[in-house]
Each structure stands twice: as C-alpha cells, then as structure tokens.
Image (spheres, rainbow, N blue to C red):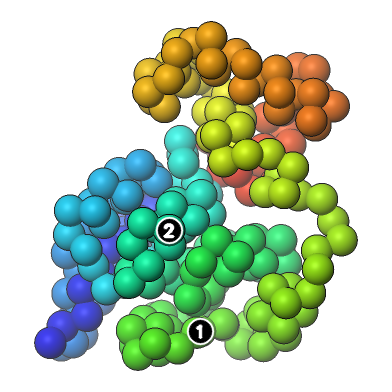
Amino acid sequence: MSIRIILADDHVILREGLNRALQSESDFSVVGQAGDGHSAIKLIRELSPDIVVMDIGMPELNGIETTRIISKELPRVKVIGLSMHSNDKYVREMFRAGASGYLLKNCAFEELVEAIRTVAGGKTYVSPSIGSMVIQEYISKTDQEKSVFSLLSQREREVLQLFAEGKTTKQTAARLHISPKTVEAHRLNLMNKLGIDNIAQLTKYAIQEGLTPSEM
C-alpha cells in the first residue's frame, strides 16, 4: 500500500518539483498540495493522508501552527517539517507542535525519502545536519527563553501573523471568522503582552519568531 502524502509549501515550483520526484517512488502517492496553512488543514481533513511534508514559513497560517492543529485534530497524520531554518527555535517548536520529523530544504532528495519512510513506520526523523541532540536538549528540557508560543494564545498568534502580513482589521476578521471588534481586542492584548505599540515592530517580531516568512 502506498504512503499517501500531502505537500504544504507556498513555493509552487518547489511543490511541483517534489511532487514529480516523490511520485517516482513506487511506494509513494502525493494526493494533494497546499500553499498555506489553512488550505493544508482543509486538504488534510478531506484526504486524511499518512504524511504531510510541511514548510514552516507559509502565509496566513504558518507551519508550526498548522502542525499544532493537525496534531490535535488528526493525530494519526504525521508531519515532517521541511524548512530552510536550522535555528534551534524552529526545530524545537515544530516538535513541540507535534511534528515527527524535521529536515532542511537543502538536503538530498534521498534523505527526504528516508525521512518519509521512517516517519510512516512510526519513528521520529531528525536530519543529521541538525544533530541528534535536538530532541533531548530542546524538547525534554525546560525552555528558559520566552517565545511567542509561550507568551501568546493561538488566536493572538494568528492575529499577529495576519497583521504582520499586511492584512487589515476587517480582512483579519473575515479570515478568522470573528468580528473586527474581537480582532482589535486580540491586537491590544498581544501588544500589551509583548510591549510593542506599532505594526512595524510587530512585523519585525513576527518574522524573528518564525510566524511569517521574511520574504513576503
């Protein structure tokens, strides 16, 4: 039986290239592609794949938040983070969100194939280029550094990402299916928690914390 895969990445060329390469493996079947977190969640709910290959820096809903939602709703679906970020923070938060694997976008295709088969077999995969110390040191250990994931609620992080990506209050409200007044309340709360009083600094913070891609 084929391992059913969904690719979630906002770069179309990368997705198409991975799609063609993965389909060449006799035991793989790419059943869907998504360019942002919301689309990925919708596809995963509809198709219930075995594996999701997930980028971190996606628009509207980043890969860490998307992984967190998938892990809660559909724990059978395994997520592999495929990212340009080797920073400890991103690796740690992806695993805490529920990912079962993490490797870098500059890895060899053979490594991705190995990671997919490893995770599909019920094991965890961490790229050797990141180091095997990641799980012990950054998951089991108490995090001394305050991060956006410990300071803000999930809804506040969603609002922060959308504001950082240039969405207005009305656009954010429509995207999250809440009222503009509620959006403003979340914005004020997160600004108070972070000690930030302007959108430019919020955007900088969101990029630093990996909530939104820096190239947007």
Whole-percent x, y for residue 116 in the image: 36, 81
Q: Residues within 10 Å of mark 1 (few under 14, many from 20)?
A: many
**In the rendered image, is residue 214 in sight?**
no
Sequence order check, earlier mark of 2 and 1: 2
Position of residue 146 in the picture relative to residue 31 (left or right): right
Whole-percent x, y for residue 123 in the image: 45, 88
Position of residue 17 in the picture relative to residue 94 (left or right): left
Give the camera-side residue of 106 and 148.
148
Up/down of 203 relative to 38, above or below: above
Give the residue displayed 72% in from the left and 83% down from the top.
136
Rendered image quadrant of residue 87: bottom right
Three-letter amino acid code of the residue under disc 2 = Lys
Give the camera-side residue of 40 and 13.
40
For label 2, the SS is helix
Residue occupied by mark 1 = 125
Up/down of 112 relative to 8, above or below: below
Whole-percent x, y for residue 209 in the image: 70, 46
For label 1, the SS is strand
Give the residue displayed 62% in from the left and 16% down from the top.
185
Q: Residues within 10 Å of mark 2 (few under 14, many from 20)?
A: few
Whole-percent x, y for residue 5 in the image: 25, 70
Cα separation between marks 2 and 1: 20 Å
What numbered label is drawn on residue 92? none
Q: Nearer the viewer, mark 2 or mark 1?
A: 2
Residue occupied by mark 2 = 72
Give the camera-side residue of 216 and 192.
192
